[in-house]
Image (cartoon, rainbow, N blue to C red):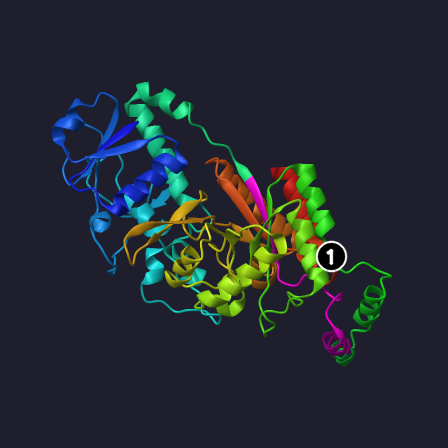
Amino acid sequence: MLLVYTHKITPRLNYVFKHIFTRILHISVDFTTKVEEFVAHEGLKLSYTKQALGNEMFIKCNDLLFNQGIDFVDITVSKWDEVPCFFFTSNNSIIPYDIFAASFYLISRYEEYLPHVKDEFERYSAEESLAFQHNFLDKPIIDIWAYKLRDILIEKHPHSLSIFENNNRNFQLISTIDVDIAYCYKHKGLLRSIGGIVNDLLKLNIADVWLRFLVIFKLKKDPFDTYSRLLYLQKKFQVPTIFFFLLGEYTTYDKNIPSRNSNYKLLIKNVADYAKVGIHPSYFSMHNDEKIKKEKNKLEQIVNFPIQKSRQHYLRFSLPETYQNLVDLEITEDYSMGYANHFGFRAGTCTPFYFYDLDFEIQTPLKIFPFAVMDGTLKDYLNYTPKKSYDTILKLAKEVQQVDGNFITLFHNESVSGKGRWRGWNKVYENMLKELA
């Protein structure tokens, strides 16, 4: 166990220390404000305050973990040992910056509470973030900091080596699949099918018209019907796979087949027999807990078990409101933490963490699973080829492997088909599993 002396124990301090030491480094941590208790402790210990008590391991604190509410924070990013960092401190600290305040700033998404320019879908964009502006978005920087701190603790206290060696964690690949449109042509209903045919004819997409007829008359498999393949790959490579199903009403942004469709219900039931499933709250649910509740109830009625996993459609969420709604609806896991327009680690970590509500200054029961990369980001936003996309995925995975973290990817049932505009992407997905599983 690590004992930490500090002049004041706050919810923020407790939260971020637990993330770094308990969740990343897998060692227990306790706190004290009593000097005599700290001095008497014979095990691993660290002081985190304004001034060192003596010759102990010491990190000078920034005020962020002892404040409440949201204020503008002046940040200067520089490098220490080739690693970007901020909140620099005095020279007598064992590291020259406040790793805990910096980690809290990133993981709490503090910057998303500050004034910023939203994108066309009302989302916080990557360009607004500190990580993007200072070129460390592609690194799980908090995990990197934690591992460097671990090495320093071991160097200064070699007897603590056994504590860390006995608590190693392992790299894990987690595949997540968003089902925005279950089928390309099947089960759309007469009006939508006619509208699709007319639209294709106006665009002179004769091949698509022909393919639609072949699929509708069961002479060819629907291009988006990739579920058996995805489940086969999950079993073959033993990669945990989670499917998020969209069950919202039809809108400009929600174009799945109706949730009342018996074929769609059967599909969801079949997938849920072999993989984990979650709700994919619709586009307009970002500020509407009633929509999420209604859609969650629909999915629960289909699968006959409680739904605890969620990912927002279009990755539209607003802090803290959307996450507060998920907490109220007893969703315990969210997978929305990532950017649509850029790959990387939005919260600075590849380790699942609990949502810290800055409005109420509490850690909530909602566990956030940050994803690192999405297929649509690479293809549609960055215009990467399948080859460049695959190389980018492996490069991100290597960063996560170096800190033994969770590498979570976001693909869609349509992208892994390798058909149409997704030509070549089936190999990207399968080769990724083969390489990283």
* Quadrant in which the N terminus is drawn: top left
Q: Position of residue 395 (x, y in %)?
A: 55, 44
Q: In which quarter of the image is residue 217?
A: bottom right
Q: Up-down: is 201 above or below 389?
A: below
Q: Magenta includes 163?
A: no
Q: In which quarter of the image is the C terminus?
A: top right
Instruction: Say what amino acid the circle numbered 1 marks.
Output: Asp
| Image position of 264 (left or right of 82) | right
Q: In this view, does 373 lie to the left or right of 224?
A: left
The residue indicated by pointer 1 is 225
- Left or right, 340 with respect to 16, comes to right
Residue sitting nearer the eye, 164 or 145: 164
**What secondary structure is marked by label 1?**
loop
Residue at position x 77%, y 78% from top? 194
Q: What stretch is highlighted in magenta?
A: 173-197
Residue 36 in the image: state x and y as whole percent: 12, 27
- Quarter assignment of residue 280: bottom right
The correct choice, above or below, for 32 with respect to 276 in the image is: above
